[in-house]
Each structure stands twice: as C-alpha cells, then as structure tokens.
Image (tube, rainbow, N blue to C red):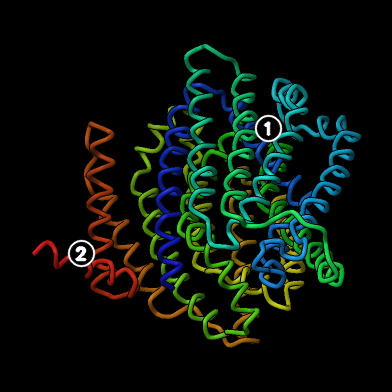
Amino acid sequence: MNLIKKQGIYNSIWLYLGTALGFVNLIIIFQRSLTIEQIGFYNLLIALVALFNQFASLGISNVITRYLPVFRTPDHKHHGFATYVFLLCGVSFGLFSALFYVFREQVIAFKGGKAATASLLSNYYPYILPIAGCALLFLIQETFARTIFKTIFPSFLREIVLRLSATVGALLVLGGWVGYGGFINIYLFTNILLVMIISGYVYSIKAYSIAPMDYKIQENLKPMLYFGFYSTLSGGSFSLLQNLDVILLKFFSGEAMVGVYSTFFAIAQVITLPAKALNITSYQIIANAWKENELEKINRIYGKTTIIQCLVGSLLLTGMIINRENLLNLLHKPEYRDHFNVLIVVGLTFLIDATGGINQAIVGFSKHYRLVMVVMIAASIVCFLLNIWLIPTFNLLGAAFSYLITISLTNFTFWLYLKLNYHMQPFSGKILLIFLTAGICIGVGIVIPPFANLVFDIIFRSGIVMILYALISYMLGVSPEFNEIIDKYLPRRK
C-alpha cells in the first residue's frame, strides 16, 4: 500500500490541479467565450476520438499491462514486445481510419441538432483522425511508463498541459484574436506536442527498446490477440456506455441540450478523481498480484481503495449540492438553472461507481476477463433501451437516470461475482457511516445563509462543511489511512 500511497499522492496533485484548471475552463471561460452548441461540439469531438480509439487500439493498454510483466527482460527489449505493440496498433489504426474516411458522409449526416452545429462537424471532421492518432500514441507510451511505475510525469502532461492549451485557446477566442477554428487548431497542436514529449520521456527511462519479435512473442500471439479483442469489446462497450446519452440526446433534444448535459457531466466527473489517482498505480499492482496468485493482497487493496474513494467522493458530491446557487451563477448561462438535478443524479452515479472500487479491474486482469466484455455489452444494451425509453419523457433527467441505473447494475454484477467466486468483500458498515456523515454535512451546508460575495460564500460554506466532514470521519474512524494522515500532522501543532 505504500507504493499506492506514494504514487497516488503525486498523481492526485496533478489530478486536482488539473481539475481546478478544468473547472475554470468549463465553468468560467468556456461559458463566456463559446456558445452552448460549440461546447456541445467540443465534447462531441472528444467523445468521437475516445470511441474511435477504443476500437482502433485493440485493447492495447490492457494488453501491455497484462503481458509486459510476462515478457520483461533486463535489456529492456522484452522479446520484441514493443515492436508487436506498434505494428499491431499501426495496422489497426490504418484500417479504422480508412473506414472512418469512407463513411465520412454518413457520420456527418447523423445529426439531431441545428444546421450550424452540423456544419461544425463537417468543417472539423478532418481533425478527428490526427487527434485520435496522437491520443493513441500517448496512451501507448503512458502505459509503458506505467508498467515500471513512472506515472507522475505522464499524468502532468495529460491533466495539466492539455487543459492549459484549452485555457489558452478559449481566452484567445474570448479576446477576439482567434475564432473557433483557432481553438480547435490549438487543441490539435497540443496533442502533437504531448506525443513528442512523452515519447522522449519514455525513451529516457528505458521502458522498452525496439527489437525483433522472438519466439516467445510468436508463441503468445494468439492469446494476446484474444485478450486484446475481448478488451476492445469491453472497453468499446464502456466508451459507448459513457457516450450513448450524448448521442441520443443529440437525436432527441438537439445540440444545446448536449452542451448543458455535457457540462454537468464533466463537473460531476470530479467525483472520480480519487479513483483515477489510485487506479493509475493499483491496476499494475493488481495485474502483478494475479500473476503471483496473491488473492489476499488483491482483496486488501480492493477494500482500502473502496473506503478511500467513497470517503473523498462523498465529500465532493456534498460540495456540489451545497454550492448549487454558486455553481449556477458561475455557469453564467440561464439554460443551466432548470436542469441542476441532472448534476446531482450524475454525481450520485459516479459516487456509486467509485464506491464499487476496482471490482471491474480485478475481474479484467484475471483469467475470467471475458466476463467484463459480456457485462459491458449487456450494460450498453440496457443503457440504450433505458435512454430510448426515458429521454423522450424526462429529457436530460432521463439520460441521467439511464446512466445511474446502468452503472449501479454493472457494479452490483462485478461485486456479486467476486463475492461468490473469490470471497472478496470490500464493503462494511463504514460505508453507511460515510453516507450518514455526508447527509449531516449536506444539511448543515444548506442551512448556512448565503453571502453577497460569491467567492467568500463558496470558501466559507465549503470550508465549514469540509471541517465538519473531516472531524466526523476522524471520530468514526471510517478510514485508517485518513486517520493516519491526521495523526501524523496533529502532534506537530501542539
């Protein structure tokens, strides 16, 4: 757990700094420099790139994480494993790019919004493939670095530098120096720059060396391809699951509603930050633990990450709820006020997912990894049917509830499987104590009278609630790791 703590702390710094920067972008700068439709299209562009790479990568990130420990050699050649990775991804990306180009008109024609937004997709369609290519190369290099526990610098590039480019681009739009096209160009240039930087970094830390593929790679080609195939289906289903609501909202409600929903969705994703920080390192440890069949170690990490993620996630959701009026005032546009409950429902969804811990990863790195594919495909179908049913009646809330129900069922399935087959159980009465603490703090935060100064109100209201939350959590002893941090620093203040 010491390694998880060390990596988690440093990665959390970049995650939270990046999130703060993302909040400034999303809540202040974007709302004053871009239209709702442009914000919606920007999120659509990111979603298309993510969805494209889920299939074009052939699950390569999971393949590297699972198989590099098997092929690792002292000379960093790893039996030519890196050569296999780049060849496979190059061929796959080329084939998917050809299909993406051939069906260009059909993709552009799939629109449910205004003609202005449809023309944005038409105008910037050529940007999708180069951005996707950069994102795929960055993913490969970052995963190689992660296998030797070099996660801090790649996290800095992804969480800070990429968001800074969006800040610069939006400010230039706001100042009238560039148009929306300039904003997209800056995003593309930054992606190219990040690939160059991380490639140099991975070379410097000697994560791998390009070498011919030897017999050991050739002997494992079939299982690696099968594993990548199943990872692609499960990962693609997960990506589709995350973007189905946006696509169907686009069809039923138009681009403006996509912009509103995407903004609330992005704000709620802050709740996943503790999980992201821990998982960057936890995933590699879980993969190595499965190799050594260390079930007790996996169960221990499972339980500790569940408590930590629930504890921090509940605090973040509490902060969003008690700062309702402050968030709406910062968002500036009136379209958001009637849909704030969407943020609460989506936030609750991410909290449930975070509280589920690393259940999906544990199954995914085990010999039963195919189950992840089956569950995620089923989840995508369920989410699609729920969206079709609920969006026409409840609009944005329909999409939010569809996501909530689907994620809850998915986490329950993975939890039940691990419970029945490996007797792994991360939950205890401490989870209920955390929820009770959050409920008390929400009540206190709501009754605090508002102040005229928005910044002071946010600081005062959030500060009081955070202190109360930390005090109750410490007294109840819900997390030994949290109490250990408090005990470490409290004596120095005496």
Q: Which of marks 2 and 1 is in front?
A: 2
Give me the residue at 52% from left, 69% from top. 357
Up the image or down, 176 lies above or below 477; here it is above
Q: Which of 353 and 394 is in front in this view?
A: 353
* Residue sitting nearer the eye, 466 or 277: 277
| Residue found at the very far right of the displayed protein | 102
- Circle 2 packing at 10 Å, graded few (<14), some (14-19), many (20+), is few
- According to the picture, the residue beneath numbered tag 1 turns out to be 254
Q: Which residue lies furthest to the top in this view?
A: 176
The kind of residue on which mark 2 rests is Tyr
> Does 114 sit left or right of 225 as displayed?
left
User: Residue 176: in sight, yes or no?
Assistant: yes
Residue at the image point whose x is 75% and y is 21% from the top? 123
Residue at position x 49%, y 45% in the image:
156
Q: Which residue lies furthest to the left in this view?
A: 494
| For residue 266, side relative to residue 180 (left or right) | left
Picture quarter with the C terminus: bottom left
Residue 110 image point, x, y percent: 81, 34
Query: Which tag, 2 or 1, sits closer to the chain's start?
Result: 1
Query: Please, what is the three-letter code of the amino acid marked with disc 1?
Result: Gly
Asked whether the viewer can see residue 392, the reply is no
Quarter of image, res 285: bottom right
Left or right: 193, with 101 as reference point: left
Q: Where is residue 76 in the image (x, y as percent from the top left)?
A: 66, 62
Pick the residue in front: 174 or 226. Answer: 226
Q: Residue 489 carries which label?
A: 2
Q: Tell me where residue 209 appears, x and y as whole percent.
A: 70, 55
User: Disc 2 and disc 1: Cα gap in Å?
Assistant: 52 Å
Label ID, residue 276: none
SS of the residue at dot 2? helix
Which one is in front, 232 or 340?
232
